[in-house]
Amino acid sequence: MTPIQSSLVLGKPRFVATDLQQLAKEQGALSAWQKAYERHGISAPNSIAGDFAVAMQTADGAVFMAVDRFAIRSLCYREINGQLRFAERADELADKSTDIDDQAIFDYFYSHVIPSPRTIFKGIFRLPPGHYALYAEGRLTVAPYWTPTFVEPVNASFEQLREEFRSILKNAVARQLDGSKAGCFLSGGTDSSTVAGMIGLAHGAPGATYSIGFEAEGYDEMAFARIAARHFNTEHHEYYVTPDDLVRSIPLVASSYDQPFGNSSALPAYYCAKMAKEDGISTILAGDGGDELFGGNSRYAKQRIFNAYRYFPSLLRKGVLEPLFKLPGMDQIPLVKKGSSYIEQASIPMPDRLQLYNLITRLGVDQVLTPELLQAVNLNVPLELQRAVWSSAVTDNLTNRELAFDWRFTLAESDLPKVCGTTRLAGVNVGFPMLDDELLAFSLRLPVDYKLKGLKLRWFFKEALRGFLPEEIIVKKKQGFGLPFGVWLTRHEALRKLARESVEGLVQRGILRGQFVEQLFNKHLPEHPGYYGEMIWISMMLEQWLQNHRDSYAIRGLNSSIEA
């Protein structure tokens, strides 16, 4: 455990007030933070842009902490003997006597990460995005200093918004460049291609681009990355990740995080960042955030279709459709079956509806997890957190509420830790121009039908950049850095051996049922490699983390002869 600190300042905070900018330049960011708190109290982070995490003592002896709106910078804390300790990583606050939180194990299987404020360690917490904490007189208060608040404009001029948007994008990219060789991730998607093009405008010359490919049908997107690289005349670099790369790097990447982390895109992101580091890049830009700020995920259109059901007259829904589709045998008729499924899903409120295809619940928690683990946890905790976040955004619109929900669970809890963790491991810094504060403010006041026009995803973003981006990329389907892990498991013996031994380790710990693991590898994986490969991946990464951080962990009261 690290010794008690008096302060911790991370990131690149941008102080809005001119005098605070000058103070930060002359005396450092901590002095500017202290003056901002003296001036604004717990609302101080609202006057500061950029990515940041701060923990400091106030003039009256309290401890104040805050992280930026997307938790790009992380801050963890624990209370010991009337003192608040804090660190960037959860494992920095843990010692050998710190217990693993069984609830966090279940939360991990549910979300494939451990959402804040919980961490893998009992009594150690992570400050959620856009939150502050104040520890005064032995009492801890944790609350949001910022809440997503959407405002629909009365009048909106596409031409004016387009010019403003392009200007903000260029400035956002420029703010993330550090004066050294400019470069970015390039998947070939809309966001990374936009960043690649904007580097040329902001930097005055094309930057370098770094792309990852896979020798697996349906997973490789290198052709689109090459289109973007040619279009913007970038210095382009490529690397094809292999199953042998995974065997070498899975233990390294898994153990590098301060707690179990199951986003399978972490491995390709690591190899991409490693390639950039070897090429002399000190700060690499990432395109994360465009889908979540401007309506690019396909589920937004899907949920709009489901949401239309509530506008049907109640008499029609309750008196005709629902009784009709529930009649015996109706679910056996193909077209009627689809209607029945639609009504069933549309009748479930959000955000619960989003979890209908949750991996662990679809597989059956009682079939996957041991009774001993299930007795130690509350199965409702993850969904209760999601409901609280869902209701917190200030908006009357479903799509905007989905965006705010994804800012927390897709970005802050999963995609950003993925990129931040793997770039840190590779030894490079990372910047997220798509999450620039000005761009966030722009999204909050952009008409919702500009984000999702009918069922057209990110309509404004694409139309505003038409003529700038290659047309092939504007019209392409979203893919990203998807990893063909399940497919490779069926073909590569060493990778399968690593995965099998890892997952069986969770059986010995009393986490997974042995019978389920046997069926997972011998029956389910060969039938549906992509789907069941995800379950193997998250299980493997959990075991790899435990082996490196808490190898003695097992569900309490169990011995080594645990069986299904």
Image (cartoon, rainbow, N blue to C red):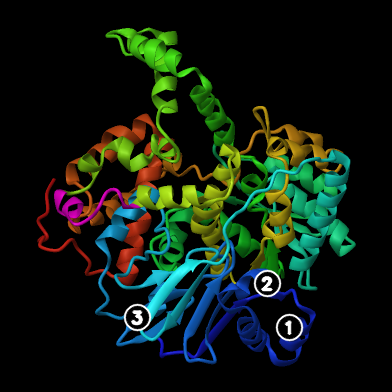
What is the number of the mark on residue 79? Answer: 3
Q: Earlier in the sequence, mark 2 or mark 1?
A: 1
Q: Secondary structure at mark 1?
A: helix
Q: Are marks 2 and 1 in contact (CB under 8 Å)?
A: yes
Identity, as a three-letter code, of the amino acid under mark 1: Leu
- 376 in the magenta segment: yes
**Marks 3 and 2, how far apart at CA:** 28 Å
Q: Nearer the viewer, residue 205 or 408?
A: 408
Identity, as a three-letter code, of the amino acid under mark 2: Ser
Residue 337 seen in the current view: no
In which quadrant is the C terminus drawn? Answer: top left
Q: Are marks 3 and 1 in contact (CB under 8 Å)?
A: no
Q: Nearer the viewer, residue 89 or 350?
A: 350
Q: Nearer the viewer, residue 534 or 86?
A: 86
Q: Secondary structure at mark 3?
A: strand
What is the number of the mark on residue 20? Answer: 1
Drawn side of residue 423 relative to residue 283, left or right: left
Range of magenta residues: 371-381
Q: Identify residue for label 2.
A: 47
Identity, as a three-letter code, of the amino acid under mark 3: Glu
Q: Give me the residue at 19% from left, 63% from top.
A: 554
